[in-house]
Image (spheres, rainbow, N blue to C red):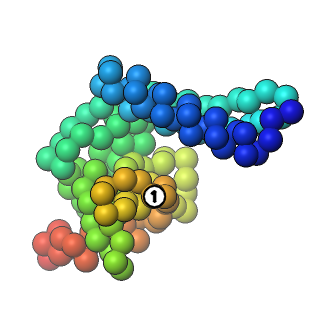
Amino acid sequence: MFTRTETKKMRTEIENALEIIAKKYGYATKVGNIKFGNVIEAKITVSKMASNSHGTYANTPEAQAFLERAERMGLAKDCLNEKYTFKGETLKITGYNSRAKKYPINYSKLDNQGNVIQRMKCSEYHLKDIIRANRPEFFL
């Protein structure tokens, strides 16, 4: 049986190995939930990269859903992948989960170097508060 500590160590090594392969081909990877016991099962997602005025981002189904819905929410499409500062934290909008009714917006908290600390979700109203604090010209 695999233990929790063994699985965490393996997850780190799997993420590092996938990152090397993804950079070689220009893709983005993400390791999802891991189940462990007698075997280790992990969900791995590989997506192509896209870019906008704020740099490159993983072209996931969530990112595409955000681009499709941005104008209906009263936002510009370039809000995706843009870094915002809100309550002393740096945030980056990563996508829209069409299956989530209450908190459909996906975003990441970033550290000072721009690395992802935590992936989070919020409502459309909270997203507008974040954007309003940084780009009030959208809401005039």
Residue 79: image x %, image y %? 24, 56
SS under mark 1: strand
Q: Is residue 131 left or right of residue 8?
A: left
Q: Is residue 133 visible?
A: yes
Badge 1 amino acid: Ile
Residue placed under numbered mark 1 in the picture: 117
Q: Is residue 96 left or right of residue 32?
A: left
Residue 59: image x %, image y %? 34, 35
Q: How many tags in the picture?
A: 1
The residue at the point 14 percent across, 47 percent down is 53
Q: Is residue 107 visible?
A: no
Q: Is residue 80 left or right of residue 15?
A: left
Residue 126: image x %, image y %? 40, 71
Question: Which of the two residues, 111 or 52, is positioned nearer the viewer here?
Answer: 111
The residue at the point 48 percent across, 48 percent down is 97
The residue at the point 64 percent across, 35 percent down is 10
- Viewport quadrant of the N terminus: top right
What crowding class fits label 1: few (fewer than 14 Cα within 10 Å), some (14-19), or many (20 or more)? few
Question: Which of the two residues, 21 or 91, is positioned nearer the viewer here?
Answer: 21
Task: Answer above or below: position of 61 versus 96.
Answer: above
